[in-house]
Amino acid sequence: MERYAGALEEAVDGARQQERHYQLLSALQGLVKELPSSFQQRLSYTTLSDLALALLDGTVFEIVQGLLEIQHLTEKSLYNQRLRLQNEHRGARERRGRRAPSAGVLRQALRQKHQEAQQACRPHNLPVLQAAQQRELEAVEHRIREEQRAMDQKIVLELDRKVADQQSTLEKAGVAGFYVTTNPQELTLQMNLLELIRKLQQRGCQAGKAAL
C-alpha cells in the first residue's frame, strides 16, 4: 500500500512538473516572438525546452537576480570612480591624505604658478619662461589623458570579467545557451536569453509563482 501511495505521489509530481514545463515553454515561445527574427531563428524548440527545464525549480531565477544585482552595483561603482576622476581633472576636487595629487589638481596649481611667475618675470625673459611653462603644461595634459585611458581600460576589463563570471555561473547551473565566450553574436544571444528569463521572472512576481 505504501509503495502504491509513493508511486502515485511521484506520478502526481511528474505531472505537475510537466505542466510547469509546458507553461514555461509556452511563455518563452511567446516572448521570443518579440525578438528580432535573426535571433528567433537561433532559439530552436530544443533550446527553449532545455531553458524551460532549467527554470523549473526557480533556482535559476534567483541566480539571475543575484547576478544582475552584482552587475548593477559594479557598474555604479565604476561610474562613480570615473566621475571622481573627471572632477579631479577639472580641478573641482582634491584627493585627501598623503597620496600624490591628481593630474587635474596639478594642472590647476600649475596654471596659478605660471601666472605668478609671469607677473614676476622681466619682459625680456618672458618668451623663454612661457615656452618652458608650455612644455610643463603639456606634460600634465599628457598625464591627464593617461589617467583617463587607464580608467577606461580598467572599466572595460572589469565589465568583461563580470560577463565571464555570469556566463560561467549560468553554464554551471545548466542554463541552455550559456558558456564563456567573447563572440559578439553569442554575447547578444545570451543577453536576449537573460532578458527572457528576467521577463519570465517579472511575470511570475506579478501573477504568482504557481502560474505564468
Image (tube, helix red, strand yellow):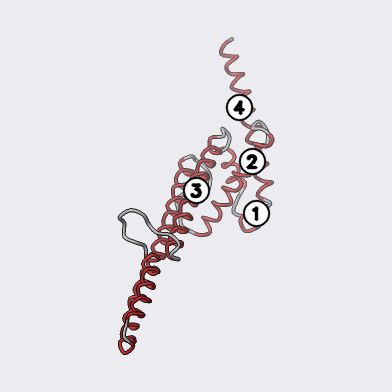
Of marks 4 and 3, the one in the foreground: 3
Residue 32 drawn above or below residue 130: above
Kindly tell me whether residue 138 is visible in this rendering: no
Residue at the location (38% across, 63% down)?
A: 150
Which residue bears the numbered disc 1?
Answer: 35
Residue at the location (65% across, 37% down)?
A: 204
Which residue bears the numbered disc 3?
Answer: 71
| Labels 4 & 2 near each other (Cβ < 8 A) | no
Marks 1 and 2 sit apart, C-alpha to C-alpha, by 17 Å
Residue 64 drawn above or below residue 87: above
Kindly tell me whether residue 62 is visible in this rendering: yes
Which residue bears the numbered disc 4?
Answer: 14
Residue 161 position, x and y percent, is: 42, 52
Residue 127 position, x and y percent, is: 34, 87
Please name the amino acid that badge 1 sits on.
Answer: Leu
Q: Which quarter of the figure is the C terminus placed in? A: top right
Which dot marks residue 203? none
Nearest to the observer: residue 19 or residue 145: 145
Nearest to the observer: residue 131 or residue 38: 131
At label 3, counting other C-alpha atoms closer than 10 Å, the crowd grade (few under 14, some 14-19, many 20 or more) is some
122 sits to left or right of 45:
left
Marks 4 and 2 sit apart, C-alpha to C-alpha, by 25 Å
Dot 3 falls on a residue whose secondary structure is helix
